[in-house]
Image (spheres, rainbow, N blue to C red):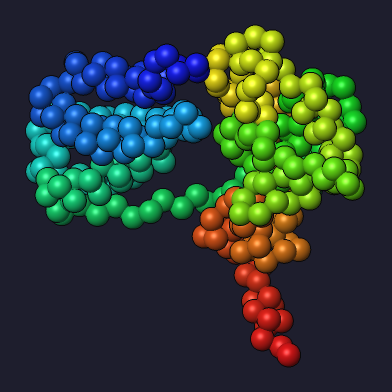
Amino acid sequence: MHHGFLPYQDPYLSRFEAWIDDKLRSLPAEVAKPVEHFAKWHHLRRIRAMATPDKSLQSPVHAAKQEITESIKFLDWLWQTHSRTAATCTQQDVDSWLMTGPTTRKAIRTFFIFAKKTGTNMRVEIGHYAAKSRPAIPQEQRLVWLKELLTGTSESLPYRVAGTLLLLYAQPLVRVASLRTDAVNINDTTGTITISLGTHPVPVPQPFAELLSQHLRNRPNLRTASGAESPWLFPGTRAGQHLHPNTIMLRLRALGIELLGARNTALVEHLAVTPPPLVADALGYSYQVAFLHADNAGDAWSRYVDQRTKP
């Protein structure tokens, strides 16, 4: 596939197709039929349309599996307990299920949106789930980890660079792993470095600029399956593929970094000094997510609007 002899096929997609068939095999027909419809006509069709050599399907496949699994649990309980199906399910059934279990049960919401769209069940409504809190770490702890990754020796160079992208620019590891080398630009005249994470390049400060330069000159796995022409900033051991985000995740967690908390804190620190739309454009977030984090941090940026209206 890497050299073009075979058409591209994402490995997560083929495994997902087999996973669906395996999940359906042991279910009663009353459960299997609506789940198959949901899994194949909603998730599988959507994920197939997303498959490109430049974008891994790992994250959307994982999310789809969670929603399908929770839908199976609910529909199996509904049939075994009340002898009702997706079509005859009531609002009371759903409310009872959601109130008596973990928050992961909220994942059935997508199933009922699909059921309403296809006319299977028009009665059930499930609202958005809002997390009660967002994990975060103290800013002092974030700075300690940044110093360790930039100057310490507790990890190898690629993982120090990946961790710094998380802690400095609030980048999810899925996005970090899939960065390409052309996202980094080195000015031949001044030697300054920028990196494109959103709609426009952002500056890379020292000493991270030097660390990033070293990594570009010494990317791993170029003498193995990836080849010297690999476009990935973090080449993997398989031809044409980047390093798996879980590999980075496990290495950084082993250091003791609380990944989600570190990313949330980094994003909030950016939002404390820069308006949400500018942060969103620079770091590759949606405006909705940027404003949500700003609001939760207690700063709705009303003063930004006031300042813009002053002459």
Residue 127, can we see it?
yes
- Give the quarter of the image for residue 210: top right
Which percent across, then down, holds residue 196?
67, 46
Residue 70, can we see it?
no
**Residue at 25%, 49% in the rendered image:** 113
Q: As rendered, which of 118 and 55 lies closer to the eye?
A: 55
Which percent across, then down, holds residue 5?
42, 14
**Residue at 62%, 57% in the rendered image:** 281
Which percent across, then down, holds residue 162?
71, 31
The quadrant the N terminus occupies is: top left
Q: As rendered, which of 84 and 108 lies closer to the eye?
A: 108
- Give the quarter of the image for residue 127: bottom left
The quadrant the C terminus occupies is: bottom right
Q: Judge whether 155 appears above or below 128 on screen.
A: above
Q: Judge whether 258 appears above or below 239 on screen.
A: below
Question: Which residue is at the far bottom?
Answer: 311
Which percent across, then down, holds residue 69?
32, 29
In the picture, measured across the screen, residue 47 lies left or right of residue 3, that is: left
Q: As rendered, which of 255 and 103 lies closer to the eye?
A: 255
In the picture, measured across the screen, residue 159 lies left or right of residue 224, that is: right
**Residue at 24%, 54% in the rendered image:** 125
In the picture, measured across the screen, residue 147 lies left or right of residue 180, that is: right
